[in-house]
Image (spheres, rainbow, N blue to C red):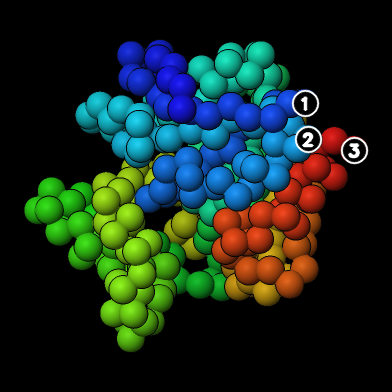
Amino acid sequence: MQTITSADGTTIAYEKTGSGPAIIVISNVAEDHTGVAGLTKILSEHFTVISFDRRGRGGSGDPQPYNPAREIEDIAALIEIAGGSAALTSGSGGCAIALDAASALGNRVTGLYLYEPPFIVDESRPPAPADYVDHVEELVAADKRSEAVEYVMTDMIGVPAEYIESMKQDPSWNEMARYAHTFAYEGRILQGLMDGKPLPADRWSIDAPIAVAVGGNSEPYFRAGADALAALLPKVTVLTLPGQDHGAFWAAPEPVAGQIREFLLS
């Protein structure tokens, strides 16, 4: 891992591999750069790939109070490392900061591949709890990190309560508990995007081409969110990844990387 200093003086740890057009892989909530290592490895065969520890994770700093705008500055600094322009890719909750960065950074972002942004734009699933961010912050402040993860899994994601005890036996649960504070960070970024209402018309202005991919086996609300983004922005292509579900960005990196190559290099 190497490090850069972001605009506010925060250290951001990153890894740069491969050669070719630059692409920055943005990890998801409650994981560091290793969470996207499978995708990064495959993409490095065709791209110069930068993966990094987002604020509050791994080797990167975490100054308080948290401000989502600083994450855009981090991505801007990484784009400079990439040579001044780069494509962005992310899955699930990370898609929102990718869109925010593309809107703020203009032609420095050459394209986006987003896998299943978790936007809730209609009644196809319940909206996010109104007090989601506050409740996560309260649990973390009380050092109830495992309880914070359980709250997110049951009340936000909708995992049936009877599955929780078995999930706690997996090592990934402890990793999520370690980064439980980032659920509130991502919740702040996603505010206004998971309310069961239309996407805000004034949040993004993006000229770069955008692919929004949805797994063929995924819940219908992901397709509704992708279609809503396509109706909002001028250069959105909605793709289907056959036979996959919401975990594909991490568990099925080969077909995801194939779609990324086809979209960004064609």
Q: Residue at left 38%, top 50%? A: 30
Q: Residue at left 48%, top 45%? A: 34
Task: Report the number of discs.
Answer: 3
Q: Earlier in the sequence, mark 2 or mark 3?
A: 2
- Left or right of 20 on screen, residue 224: left
The amino acid sitting under disc 2 is: His
**Along the viewing direction, whichever of 113 and 176 lies nearer the viewer:** 176
**Along the viewing direction, whichever of 193 and 31 lies nearer the viewer:** 31
Viewer-side label of 2, 3: 2
The amino acid sitting under disc 1 is: Gly
Looking at this view, name the residue that lies furthest to the left: 142
Q: Callout 1 environment at 10 Å: few (<14), some (14 to 19), or many (20+)?
A: few
- Left or right of 83 on screen, residue 239: right
Q: What is the secondary structure assignment of the residue under circle 2?
A: loop
Q: Position of residue 124 (x, y in %)?
A: 56, 73
Label number found at residue 266: 3
Q: Which residue is mark 1?
A: 20
Q: Residue at left 59%, top 61%? A: 251
